[in-house]
Image: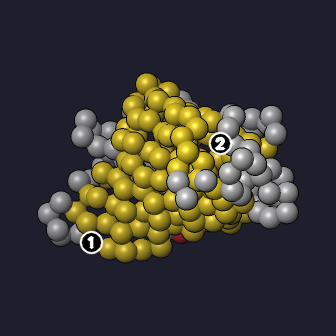
């Protein structure tokens, strides 16, 4: 198996970055690689939501879990926890993939979101992500999010945004796994 490049989206004070084509039955797995996503607003979380057909409501039903491990620069604050406030139980909001990224010049979030079999007309659409961020309080966080989009209709588009303010900078690359 190898990654097949499909497209990229680069932010420059962008409200959202979206991929509205390229997600189809060509691949059973799609990956979105985030490189140094930098929020304009301090303490913001990168989020995603998907849609079907030519719809642009980005309000599909999601069930998810959110875990993180963290370590402060001083070594004084460490933990591995489940974060109930960041998951969804049949919710239609944008799903957080990290939380509280700092907006300082050296702060950002990078990682990978994998979407499985988005064109299936039989099964729900599973996803998993692993992100690493520079938290606003000089903390590194390794965040794991997994879940499913509760629809058997084919997904055709995906949108990313910070939960507050614009995406100041950063690039997302979309790959098919072949």
| Within-10-Å neighbours for mark 1: few <14, some 14–19, many 20+ | some
**Residue at coordinates 42% horizontally, 74% vertically from top-left?**
81
Q: Position of residue 109 (x, y in %)?
A: 38, 47
Contact, mark 1 vs mark 2 (Cβ under 8 Å):
no
Mark 1 vs mark 2: in front: 2
View extreme (top): residue? 12
Residue denoted by label 2 = 158
Please indicate whether residue 76 sits to the left or right of residue 30 in the image: left
Is residue 95 at all visible to an observer of this figure?
A: no
Is 65 placed above or below 170 here?
A: below
Whether residue 130 is visible: yes
Number of marks present in the image shown: 2
Residue that numbered label 1 is attached to = 78
Residue at image coords 55%, 59%: 1
Residue at 63% x, 36% y is 19
Residue 146 pos. (x, y %): 57, 65
Looking at the picture, how far across and down is residue 162, in whole percent?
Answer: 50, 41
Is 135 placed left or right of 53 in the picture? left
Q: Earlier in the sequence, mark 1 or mark 2?
A: 1
Residue appearing at x 43%, y 62% in the figure: 143
In the structure shown, which secondary structural element does the residue marked by tag 2 occupy?
strand
- How much space separates mark 1 and mark 2, taking CA atoms? 33 Å
Vertical side of 103 occupied by 139: above or below: below
Secondary structure under the numbered disc 1 in the rendered image: strand
* Side (left or right) of 153 relative to 62: right
């Amino acid at each position: 198996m190898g990654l097949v490049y499909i497209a990229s989206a680069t932010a420059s004070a962008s409200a959202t970055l979206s991929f509205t084509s390229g997600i189809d039955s060509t691949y059973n797995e799609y990956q979105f690689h985030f490189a140094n996503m930098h929020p304009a607003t301090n303490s913001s979380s990168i989020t995603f939501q998907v849609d079907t057909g030519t719809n642009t409501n980005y309000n599909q039903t999601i069930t998810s879990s959110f875990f993180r491990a963290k370590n402060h620069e001083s070594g004084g604050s460490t933990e591995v926890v489940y974060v109930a406030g960041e998951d969804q139980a049949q919710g239609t909001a944008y799903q957080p993939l990290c939380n509280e990224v700092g907006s300082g010049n050296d702060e950002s979030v990078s990682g990978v979101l994998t979407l499985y079999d988005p064109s299936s007309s039989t099964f729900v659409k599973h996803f998993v992500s692993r992100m690493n961020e520079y938290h606003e309080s000089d903390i590194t966080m390794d965040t794991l999010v997994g879940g499913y989009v509760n629809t058997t209709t084919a997904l055709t588009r995906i949108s990313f945004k910070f939960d507050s303010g614009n995406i100041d900078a950063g690039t997302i690359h979309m790959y098919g796994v072949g």
